[in-house]
Image (cartoon, rainbow, N blue to C red):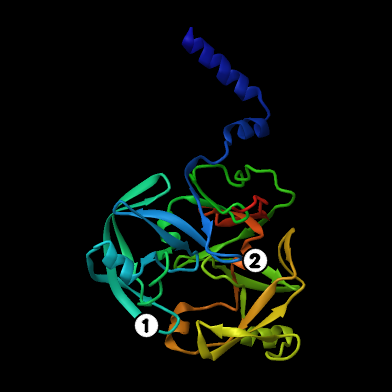
Amino acid sequence: MPRMRQVILLAILATLPPGLARAKDCALPKLINQVQMARAGHGEVDLIPVTVNGTEEKFIFDTGGFFSQIGPAAAASLHLPVQPGGRELYDVRGTISRDEAQADSFTLGQVTRAHVALQLSPNVGAFDGSPIAGILALDMLSGADADLDFGADTLKLFSQDHCPGKVIYWQPPATAIVPIVLARNHITVPVMLDGHPFNAVIDTGASDTALTETAAKRIFGLTPGDANTQRYGELNGDPALPTYVHWFTALTFGQVSVGEPGVLVIPDDKSRARQDLAIPDLILGMDVLRNLHIYLAMAERKMYVTPASQTPQK
């Protein structure tokens, strides 16, 4: 009897229209991990809770980082063994770190990894005197799709075993689908800034969206320092690297638009560090990303973009 029931079921499925049969088989992605992040301050980057060797720490969630890293002070406080590694990590001033700290366990959400190597931050005083211990980059999310609702500060990781395009489980008012290029743990996507196309890097570790001075002059005819592009501050606290701000009309991903973004104009540093970091013309920081809910379908090499939820912050 069981075998006959199976044959009858298969026969029924065979008579269904092909589209219905495929739709029945295409379930939404399976949730495998979830983390609640917290904002470092108003309009600032997100901090993500992790546990290193049983001790709770806060890392900056940074899709613009090449590798996950830990500050020297935090590594010393946690008594992590430090030894030479096989990679070089630069900061924006050109300081190099070749060392890595070894953690017996590293927990993100409900997932714990054993024997994790964290690159030692090249910026010795980067996290000293702050509650931030390090940076969590995309290398810690490998093998999964990443769902980021920056309105609610949530990170969800989903299995990549799903039908292409079957990822939107919420009910957005608009959706844009854009291709992504993943290189050296950086995600680049096409966007339009006031009608001009750019390949921009998604950088959750940056508070502000930034445009290089060369691109600002060449593409938009901006003059840093005039009334429309006023002096803003300094890049990484260096007086020799002044920054400016210009207010644009819109930055768009297909049907999804962020209106009136204030974009920093940053100097074109020709140092070795900037060349190695391969900084693009446009970097999308949290001031823009905070308005979005994005799903990174890594196997598809696509990013699904919708407006962020409006969950109130505590």
Tag 2 or tag 1, which sits nearer the N-term?
A: 1
In the structure shown, which secondary structural element does the residue marked by tag 2 occupy? helix
> Which residue is at the front of the view, 243 or 115?
243
Q: Amino acid at mark 1?
A: Thr
Q: Looking at the image, which residue is at 57% across and 62% down?
A: 180
Q: Which mark is residue 95?
A: 1
Q: Residues within 10 Å of mark 2 (few under 14, many from 20)?
A: many
Image-quadrant location for residue 191: bottom right
- Residue 112 position, x and y percent, is 35, 48
| Position of residue 248 in the picture relative to residue 199 (left or right) | right
Alpha carbon of mark 1 to alpha carbon of mark 2: how far?
A: 29 Å
- Residue 234 position, x and y percent, is 56, 85
> Which residue is at the front of the view, 136 or 6?
136
Q: Which mark is residue 169?
A: none
- Residue 102 position, x and y percent, is 26, 61
For label 2, the residue is: 288
| Position of residue 22 in the picture relative to residue 119 (left or right) | right
Q: Looking at the image, which residue is at 69% across and 43% down?
A: 171
Image-quadrant location for residue 13: top right
Q: Looking at the image, which residue is at 51% across and 67% down?
A: 205
CB contact under 8 Å: marks 1 and 2: no
Image-quadrant location for residue 293: bottom right
> Which residue is at the front of the view, 1 or 137?
137
Say if 70 sits above or below 33 in the image: below
Q: Amino acid at mark 2?
A: Val
Q: Looking at the image, which residue is at 65% across and 23% down?
A: 15
Say if 271 sits above or below 252 in the image: below
| Position of residue 114 in the picture relative to residue 259 (left or right) | left
